[in-house]
Image (cartoon, rainbow, N blue to C red):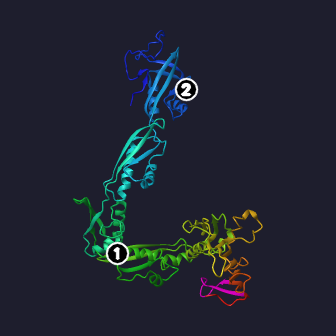
Amino acid sequence: MKLPMLGFLLLAFGATVLQAQTPADTILPVISYEKPKDFEVGGVRVTGAQYADQQALIAIAGFRIGDKIRIPGAGITKAVQSLWNLRLFTDVQIIQERTQGNLVFLEILVKEMPRYPRHSYTGVKKNKHEDLNGVITRFIQKGAILTESIKMSLKSGMEDYYIEKGYLNAKVDIKAAPDERATNGVKLEFVIDPGKRVKIKDVIFVGNENVKSKTIRKKMKNTSRKRKIFKKSKLVESEFEEDKRAIEAYYNTIGFRDARVVRDSIWRTPKGEVMVELNIQEGARYYFRNVTWKGNTIYETKFLDQVLGITKGDVYNQELLGTRLQFSQDGRDISSLYLDNGYLFFRADPVETAINNDSIDLEIRIYEGPQATIDRVLIKGNDRTHEHVIRRELYTRPGDKFSRADIIRSQREIVNLGYFNPETLDINTPVNPDRGTVDIEYTVEEKPSDQLELSAGYQPRTAFSRGGVIGTLGVTFNNFSLRNIKNKETWNPLPQGDGQRFSIRGQTSGQNFQSYNASFTEPWLGGKKPNSLTVAGVYNRFAYGFEGSSTYQKLGILQGSVGFGTRLKFPDDNFVFRANLDIQTLNLNNWTGFPR
């Protein structure tokens, strides 16, 4: 960079004359650097700043009109350093423009760092541009300052992008050139040479005396040799580390609690392929011996032993132990016993009390704590569905004892409504330990649940019909609200939010066949119990021949139905009973049956 100047460079010492460019007949004072002189700042202006605010730069430099300043002095040096610390400029100078008596007028001359306005690619196809653009935006945005450090990060980021895809020899070069479209802009050109994808020739295991290499290789989901069909063969560091941890986890499930991948070696063959060698230290295989319980008062030790399902002589399995203590998909775990009975503060800590040869004694220390009562049940995020529609499906109610099983059941019932996104459904349980209560918060996200069916075509003329347009039009509103039918503000496109189902559908095949049906379902008749009522009507019309002719025949079927359903209590409330009453009338006109 250029050193800061005040007329001349302020680093020059001795009896030097400091002057600015002026007409020849103007006499400037001679300033001796051996004798600094005090001035009063009469004015300051900034040149060269296109993006930075000029007044802000003057303030950062510390100059104010009327302030006293010594020339030469530490104030000038401090001002230059303050501006330089902004990291916005490649050059900073402070120049004395002129003096007028005891007044000095200064100019701050800066040269801003280049900006990045756009870029281009060379050596890659367009279908990769979007992914590479994502790499760029991680390090710099358009219009931002471009530094050498950022350029190095861009180069490294793009090479890492290709390395993760198996292109271990990828090279990226960045060319920078002035951009005529932007002031002080630098256009970047990324010259990319991905090279060939480097595959893993083989994965070798050393030290695995008790487990076959074939079995271990199956545990490596991400790192596989190229001989496997329909499976990627590439080496990605993060995935490779994940596979090593998976190998250790597998060993732990079969009793080798001390097993570790102690070393890995990676090298390239003469053909450029990758060889991977993993050195495994298995250690000894351990077994469960004595399992004791401490702190349990609610459930007897014998019952806890049955639920745990681990007996003396079983292979030591840390994963199984953790599952049986904390959470099992089939509900067979100690934690479920307590949490479903209100013991929200329950904790079970397994402690290895003795290790003799290959046997391990466990003491499971239980903290039961008090039972927690549900205080409030909150529902958030339902901007279309009315709250009572969700609340009536919940199995968690204020005043009940906390139960994890009830929360899981409530979650399932909310999802089964079909009105909310199951992936974003969130349940929080903020606890008040002083009161021994817990709030349950259900956060939902509405999703479209209505259905539209539309199809159309054309049927040519036949011996039985004139032909014509054929098609189907149907619409189903799965979250309908009959009570808001008069409230136009709730229409979108029809009133919704009460969980009722309304559908209407029409189908035609010209004169040969026409069908119309409509139905309405109230899932909670009366609003207090899950008793459903369904009312439906269907009209089907069949006709053959031409109307008015002697061969014309027609069949009309009008059907009405009323259905009732209720949730049973036996054998449990997952069973539903339904009954329908159908009434049907037939209207025949010269009908002899369907023609063959």
Range covered by the magenta-colored residues: 565-583
Q: Residues within 10 Å of mark 2 (few under 14, many from 20)?
A: some
Helix, strand or loop at mark 1: strand
In the image, residue 88 sits, relative to residue 197, either above or below, namely: above
Q: Given the image, on which type of amino acid does mark 2 rest?
A: Arg
Q: Residue at x 56, y 73 (%)?
A: 370
- Which of the 4 image quadrants contains residue 594? bottom right
Residue 440, which numbered label?
A: none
Q: Position of residue 529 (x, y in %)?
A: 69, 79
Q: Position of residue 230 (x, y in %)?
A: 36, 69
Q: Position of residue 439 (x, y in %)?
A: 61, 67
- Which of the 4 image quadrants contains residue 262? bottom left
The residue labelled by disc 1 is 354
In the image, residue 534 sits, relative to residue 455, either above or below, namely: below
Q: Given the image, on which type of amino acid does mark 1 rest?
A: Ala
Q: Is residue 10 visible?
A: yes
Give the mark toward the camera: 2 or 1: 2
Given residues 317 and 390, the one toward you in this image is 390
Given residues 44 and 70, the one toward you in this image is 44
Q: Residues within 10 Å of mark 1 (few under 14, many from 20)?
A: few
Given residues 130 and 489, the one toward you in this image is 130
Return the residue found at the far top: 25
Q: Which of the two discs, 2 and 1, labels the residue nearer the N terminus?
A: 2
Is 462 inside the magenta-drawn segment?
no
The residue labelled by disc 2 is 64
Q: Residue at x 41, y 22 (%)?
A: 10
Q: Are marks 2 and 1 in contact (CB under 8 Å)?
A: no
Q: CA distance from mark 2 to mark 1?
A: 77 Å
Is 582 inside the magenta-drawn segment?
yes
